Image (tube, rainbow, N blue to C red):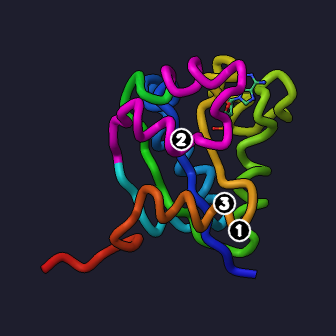
């Protein structure tokens, strides 16, 4: 079915000038970029986005990294967009990511793993609303 999912190109991938290369993979796979925002998250914002990971041993490192520089947040749309995006990304731990996946090619570590993608329809809905509270592509006045 047609779905939308939230994608984040993380600070390490932005810093290595890989935005175009990564977006190209989405488009080549048939996913359409229907919304995009570049932003530099505050600690409060990153902590709220990753609220489900609060208390985990990697949480401080995760929010520290996610607030270390600009990210590109996007909504991807297409057939089975959630699973397709996760396939393109590869495993969360880049050491386990299949060759040719985004994380295999652009991740630097488990924390600096280049991209984020929603893992389920409910998560996608929450994450899209988190970054696009006014709708995904509001008409300007
Ligand atoms: P992401 O898909 O953005 O969701 C949460 C992030 O936490 C994940 O990518 C990883 O970068 C990071 N993460 C999850 N589990 C671990 C772990 N065991 N050790 C270090 N980082 C982790």
At label 2, counting other C-alpha atoms closer than 10 Å, the crowd grade (few under 14, some 14-19, many 20 or more) is few
Residue sitting nearer the eye, 102 or 126: 126
User: Marks 3 and 2: which is nearer the front?
Assistant: 3
Magenta segment, principal secondary structure?
Answer: helix
Residue sitting nearer the eye, 124 or 12: 124
- Provide residue 11's location: percent of width, then percent of height: 46, 28
User: Marks 1 and 2: which is nearer the front?
Assistant: 1
Residue on which disc 1 sits:
121
Label 1: which secondary element: helix
- Chain-order first, disc 1 or disc 2: 2
Residue sitting nearer the eye, 55 or 118: 55
Is residue 24 within the magenta segment?
A: no
Residue on which disc 2 sits:
21
At label 1, counting other C-alpha atoms closer than 10 Å, the crowd grade (few under 14, some 14-19, many 20 or more) is some
Residue on which disc 3 sits:
123
Position of 1 relative to 29 (above/below): below
Q: Which range of residues does the magenta coloring cover?
A: 38-65
- Provide residue 84's location: percent of width, then percent of height: 75, 60
Is residue 61 within the magenta segment?
A: yes
Q: CA distance from mark 1 to mark 3?
A: 5 Å
Q: How many marks?
A: 3
């Amino acid at each position: 079915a047609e779905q939308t999912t939230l994608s984040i190109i993380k600070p390490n991938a932005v810093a290595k000038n890989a935005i175009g290369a990564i977006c190209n993979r989405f488009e080549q796979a048939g996913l359409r970029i229907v919304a995009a925002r570049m932003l530099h998250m505050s600690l409060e914002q990153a902590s709220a986005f990753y609220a489900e990971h609060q208390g985990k041993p990697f949480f401080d490192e995760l929010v520290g990294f996610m607030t270390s520089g600009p990210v590109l947040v996007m909504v991807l749309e297409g057939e089975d967009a959630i699973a397709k995006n996760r396939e393109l990304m590869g495993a969360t731990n880049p050491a386990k990511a299949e060759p040719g996946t985004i994380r295999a090619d652009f991740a630097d570590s488990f924390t600096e793993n280049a991209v984020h993608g929603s893992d389920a329809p409910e998560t996608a809905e929450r994450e899209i609303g988190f970054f696009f509270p006014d709708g995904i592509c509001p008409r300007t006045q």
